[in-house]
Image: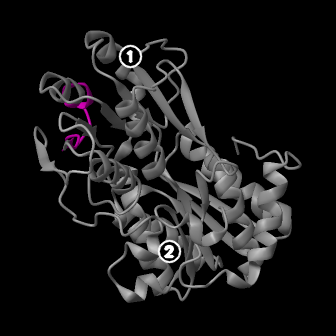
Amino acid sequence: MTKAAALLLAGSLALAACASDEDGGDAATGSAGGGSEDLKVGVAYDTGGRGDRSFNDSAIAGVEAAIEEHGGDVRDLSPNADASNRVELLTQLADEGYNPIIAVGFAYGDVIGDVVEQYPDTTFAIVDSSVEEIGADNLVGLLFAEEQGSFLAGVAAALKSETKSVGFVGGVETPLIEKFQAGFEAGVEAVDPTVTVTSQYISPAGDFSGFNDPAKGQIVAQGMFDGGADIVYHAAGGSGLGVFQAAAASNGRAIGVDSDQYNTVDDPALQAVIMTSMLKRVDNAVQAFIDSFVEGNVEGGSDVVSNLETEGVGLATTGGFIDDIEADIDEYRQQIIDGEIEVPTTP
């Protein structure tokens, strides 16, 4: 959501589908870039870990870009199967001397307050969770206006739908993913109120398996295509692969999320059905946070919000599938930036 090309992920995201093991991770040395050789960045992933080709991979892409510029090392860890060891991941990184430490995902919000209190000399950031109420001066929240980017995804879906029926697949029913749903539904409504939107979640609140279950993602999306939808938008992390598979099997189309997923799938048949992706520039936000840390400018206890105006969210145009409606999308984008359209954050 910028002028299209400007919002594409800089370079390909790390696609290695090699999630770290439960109690360890991969330590990698970044190439020197004139920065501090003492920089040691710790990353605690969300469910699905590295290789999800979406949310987690976008975060590590931002870390690697910062390491390339400043030099230093990165250590990344993934949660165990039920994600019950989030505290252990953060404390392990802190005990090993990594600073700053980035918690990827709102699920860390319930535990990070206690952790940062134990390590006052370590700087932390958490993606997708507000920190202002915690009040810790060594913690920063990296937030996004997902509803704004999703609104534009809804605009694109409504303009491109031939059946006047589209779908939304959420990974886990949480307030965060409901922002994606709300924005998408509002965007469709703004373009054409006669277009039907079917929204469904893979797993209920508290069950984070919905972010890493492509098989269930395919089942949910297939039901939408079978019901007449011709475009399905997902906000389901690694489960989005199943949405793409359902689209390919149904001669439908899909909208990716977080990363430019046209560039992150391996199968040309799946690539062909991804008409756009709602870009959530976690990579840019993470890189900017590390830059601020290196420069000594981190403002602890505060949230940094990325939105359409800051180009923190947007739509990818890779493949040229939405080039013909770019002017319409730009018009809605500007109306949101100007405050003429207020996008809802709840369905």
The amino acid beneath tag 1 is Gly
- Taking the view exactly as shown, the residue that stands out farthest to the right is 340
Residue 317, image x, y percentages:
59, 76
Q: Kindly identify the residue that appears in the image at 41 percent across and 88 percent down.
A: 269
Tell me the tag on residue 222: 2
> Which label was assigned to residue 183?
none
Q: Tell me where residue 157 sits by quadrant.
A: bottom right
The reply to whether callout 1 and callout 2 are in contact (CB within 8 Å) is no
Mark 1 and mark 2: Cα distance apart in space:
40 Å
Q: Is 16 included in the stretch rendered in magenta?
A: no
Residue positioned 58% across, 72% down in the render? 5
Residue 93 is left or right of residue 64, and the answer is left
Identify the disc placed on residue 113. 1
> In the image, 88: left or right of 212?
left
Q: Which residues are magenta?
A: 76-89
Residue 292 in the image, given as x and y percentages of width and height: 43, 33
Mark 2 residue type: Gln
Secondary structure beneath dot 1 equals: helix
Q: Quadrant of the C terminus?
A: top right
> What residue appears at the point 40 percent right and 59 percent down from the top-left corner?
54
Q: Is residue 51 above or below residue 303?
A: below
Residue beneath the point at 64% across and 46% down: 307
